[in-house]
Amino acid sequence: MRLRATNVASAFNHAMVVPSADWSDAVDRIMQPTLVIHGACDPILPLPNGEAIADHVNDARLHVLNDAGHELNPLDLDEIRATIVTFINSTNTHGE
């Protein structure tokens, strides 16, 4: 398992955003196809947060990075890139 969020100061930055705000109304208003990419081992915003976002956004897809923590790791870039390309290709209706 590659937990990447080890910088305590960085973790405190998230406390300013997350504490008790209820963003569900704003998330419910997103009407574009949305790709949610979330680390399965995120110690700062655990996976249920990503699952909740995907559940509340109309036409959302959740992709879980199995060994990922909170930060992006260069080792995951190929998987992330392929996931984004597949998502864009599946939602692209331009010209149809």
Image (cartoon, rainbow, N blue to C red):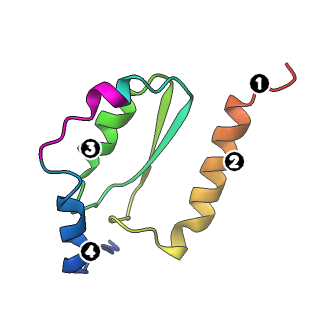
Residue 87 is left or right of residue 9, and the answer is right
Please give the residue where the numbered disc 3 appears in the rendered image: 49
**Under tag 1, what secondary structure?**
loop
> At label 4, which amino acid type do we have?
Ser
**Under tag 2, what secondary structure?**
helix
Determine whether 4 is above or below 52 in the image: below
Residue 64 is left or right of residue 31, and the answer is left
Distance from Cα at disc 1 to Cα at disc 2: 14 Å
Q: Which image quadrant is residue 14 in?
A: bottom left
Earlier in the chain: of badge 1 and badge 2, it is: 2
Q: Position of residue 7 (x, y in %)?
A: 25, 80
Distance from Cα at disc 2 to Cα at disc 4: 30 Å
Please give the residue where the numbered disc 1 appears in the rendered image: 93
- The mark closer to the camera, 1 or 4, is 4
Bounds of the magenta span?
20-26
Earlier in the chain: of badge 1 and badge 4, it is: 4
Determine whether 95 is above or below 38 in the image: above
Earlier in the chain: of badge 3 and badge 2, it is: 3
Determine whether 41 is above or below 61 in the image: below
Q: Position of residue 60 (x, y in %)?
A: 48, 30
Residue 55 is left or right of residue 76, and the answer is left
Please give the residue where the numbered disc 4 appears in the rendered image: 10
| Label 2–label 4 contact, CB within 8 A | no
- The mark closer to the camera, 2 or 4, is 4
Look at 30% across and 73% down and name the residue there.
Answer: 3
Distance from Cα at disc 3 to Cα at disc 1: 29 Å
> At label 2, which amino acid type do we have?
Val
The outermost residue toward the top is 96
Q: Residues within 10 Å of mark 1 (few under 14, many from 20)?
A: few
Q: Residues within 10 Å of mark 3 (few under 14, many from 20)?
A: few
Please give the residue where the numbered disc 2 appears in the rendered image: 85
